[in-house]
Image: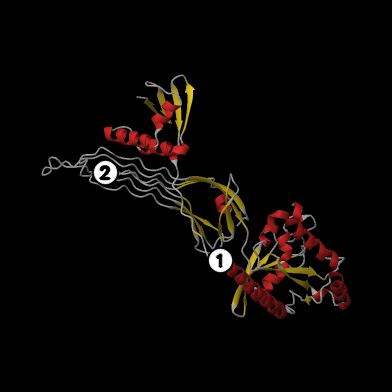
Amino acid sequence: MQFVDECTLTLKAGNGGNGVVSWRREAHYPEGGPWGGDGGNGGSIIIIGDHNINTLFDLRNKKNIFAENGENGQTKMATGKQGEDCYIKVPLGTSIYDAYSKELIVDILKSGQTYTICNGGKGGHGNAFFKSSFNKAPTLFENGDLGEERKIDLKLRYVADVGIIGFPNAGKSTLVSALSNARPRIANYQFTTLVPVLGTVSIKDKNLVFADIPGLIEGASEGKGLGHDFLKHIERCQMLIHLISLSEIDNDDLFQAYSTINDELSKFNNKLTKKKILVVLNKSDMCSDESIVKDFCNKAKLKDVLVISAKDKLNLDKLLDQVYKIYIEQEAKNQKALDTRVSDTEVIELKKQKDYKQDLKITMIEDHIWQVESEFLKYWSYKIPLTTKDNIIRFNQKMLSIDVENKAKQLGAIKGDTLKIYDLEFVVE
């Protein structure tokens, strides 16, 4: 399957169904009451993590995704059918951002993790809902709420415990295949690995995920080679194995190769160099000169490095022992950091009720014509269709609750002036 790790989607949740006005008309109920049912809720759009998927390729061509609308209410107080939710499966490690503000919405890190990205609209009430001792024959009803709309950017960064980095031909793919059941394509030329390859390795009581990160080159932090496309996949790794080839064919200078990769990590994200990095020299089967290893350790100011041969599976048990030790230390460190974030006292602030009077904006657009803007009235102008007397009275009550007419008069409106409220028009009395 082709590798795609970024895409943009426009989402639209389902609208709620409309409520209806209906009356009970049966032989034994000549004066039957209201019988109009509520509309069904619109379907929501839900993101779900799926460990069986490793690419965003299937979503790349789905530019627009819609959930199903709720059905309108029916007579006999029957509620309309609810719209089906729409599930979007994404690989683990997918970060979802708002396409406009660029703010992170959610990280999908676990299989089965769900997040409702767009809520479906609530169904509108039919006239049976509004029956009361004061109004036994209401003609009140509502339209369903509109489903939420959103444009999002999806970016995939692989979730792995151990990331293997290094120049092309360092032997990263060979190492992953030797340690796990992963079978990446391996050949003796640069950029054989074009996508990160994951392999699970059992070490004592842990199952760790190793990631073969495609080869880096000088200038990768500036986008050269495979550059930015794969440096970001290192960010979520708990630790890194910096693999360096001992072969003279691959590297003229071990220390130069070591320094170049470290510089690229630092330039891309300085936090990467602060991760625990295990330096490993590979391809010992192609170099038996111990002085080269000692010279490298002196230049790199490292006490000791592990020398292995991934091809011959030499010293891989020692490598796994060191990985396990570092992983356990990092796990304990992360847990300690998590525990210290929990404060002894926690202040909970109650959510304040929004003051819609402050949100009200009235401006004169022509002589004796005033434009009224308010999120409160925008919602109710759609929600309450002005097709019945009861609905007209109810909408007038909504306007009265935020003092629309009095504020218009304070600004200079007089009797007979027109108030334009979105698609509606009213006359000042």
To which residue does mark 1 refer?
A: 343
The percent position of residue 326, horizontal first and vertical second, equals 68, 75
The percent position of residue 423, horizontal first and vertical second, equals 41, 30
The percent position of residue 108, horizontal first and vertical second, equals 55, 59
Compared across the picture, whether 161 is left or right of 405 comes to: right
Circles 2 and 1 in contact, beta carbons < 8 Å: no
Compared across the picture, whether 38 is left or right of 217 comes to: left
Residue lying at 40% horizontally and 32% vertically, measured from the top left:
404
To which residue does mark 2 refer?
A: 130
Query: Marks 2/1: CA distance?
Result: 48 Å
At mark 1, the secondary structure is loop
Q: Quadrant of the C terminus?
A: top left
**Amino acid at circle 1:** Ser
Compared across the picture, whether 310 is left or right of 64 comes to: right
Q: Residues within 10 Å of mark 1 (few under 14, many from 20)?
A: few
Can I make out residue 385 in this image?
no
Question: Does 255 sit above or below residue 99?
Answer: below
Q: Nearer the viewer, mark 2 or mark 1?
A: 1
Residue lying at 52% horizontally and 62% vertically, measured from the top left:
346
At mark 2, the secondary structure is helix
